[in-house]
Amino acid sequence: MLKEKVTSLLDKALEEHPSLFLIDFTMGSDNTIRVVLDGDQGVNLQDCMNISRAIEHNLDREDEDFSLEVTSAGATSPLELPRQYKKNIGRKLAVKTEDKELEGTLTEATTDTITLEWKAREPKPVGKGKVTVQKKEVIPFSDIHKAKVILKF
C-alpha cells in the first residue's frame, strides 16, 4: 500500500520536473525509501529537495513510519538509461561489452545506439613504424554491459 502511494507521488513529482528522471527506486521491508535521480542538465540539491518534499509532505507519519532518501546518480555511477548518454555527449566513456572494452569520446547517442570515437596507434600499412588513426564504433545499447564516464582531474 505504501509503495503504491510513494510510486504515485514520485511519478507526479517527476511529471512536474520534466528534466529529471528516475534511475532507481527501492523500498526496504523497514519502509526505507531510496530514490536515485538524474537529469538532462544534472541534478542539484534543490531538485532532490523538491522531489523529497513532494513525497514526504503527502505521506502521514501517523499512518506509516518511513525514512526517505533522495539522491542524484553519482559521477562515478554507471550509466543505466539511454537518456543519460545524451547528456554525456562529448565526454570520455569506458564501455564494456560481451567481448571487448573500449574507451573513447561519446559523439552520438540515439534511442538504440551510442557512437564512440578515439585515436589509436597502428602499424603502417606499408613499411615500418606506426600511424595514428581515427577509430569509430557504433554500439547498440543491448550490447553494453557497463558504461561509465571517465573523470579527468
Image (cartoon, rainbow, N blue to C red):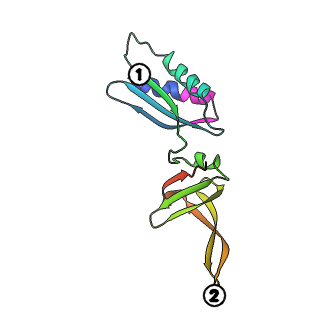
State the residue position of label 2.
Answer: 128
Q: Which residue is mark 1?
A: 67
Q: Residue furthest bottom?
A: 127
- Percent x, y for residue 84? 59, 46
Classify residue 111 as left or right of residue 101: right
The amino acid type, in three-letter code, at marker 1 is Ser
Q: Which residues are magenta?
A: 11-21
In which quadrant of the rendered view does residue 117 lie?
Answer: bottom right
Dot 2 crowding, Cα within 10 Å, few <14, some 14–19, many 20+: few
Question: Is residue 65 placed above or below 143 in the rendered structure?
Answer: above
Camera-side mark, 1 or 2: 2
Which of marks 2 and 1 precedes in the sequence? 1
| Residue type indicated by callout 2 | Lys
Disc 1, SS? strand
Give whichever of 147, 24 is nearer the camera: 147
Identify whether 89 is placed above or below 25. below
Residue displayed at 54% across by 47% down: 81
Describe residue 6's horizontal placement relative to residue 21 as left or right: left
Whole-percent x and y of residue 37? 54, 35
Quadrant in which the N terminus is drawn = top left
| Residue drawn at the location 60% of the way across and 28% of the way down | 47
Residue 26: quadrant of the picture: top left
Q: Is residue 123 above or below residue 144?
A: below
Local packing at callout 1 (Cα closer than 10 Å; few below 14, some 14-19, many 20+) is: some
* Label disc, if present, on residue 3 of the rendered structure: none
Q: Relative to 88, does residue 29 appear above or below in the rendering?
A: above
In magenta stretch: residue 99: no
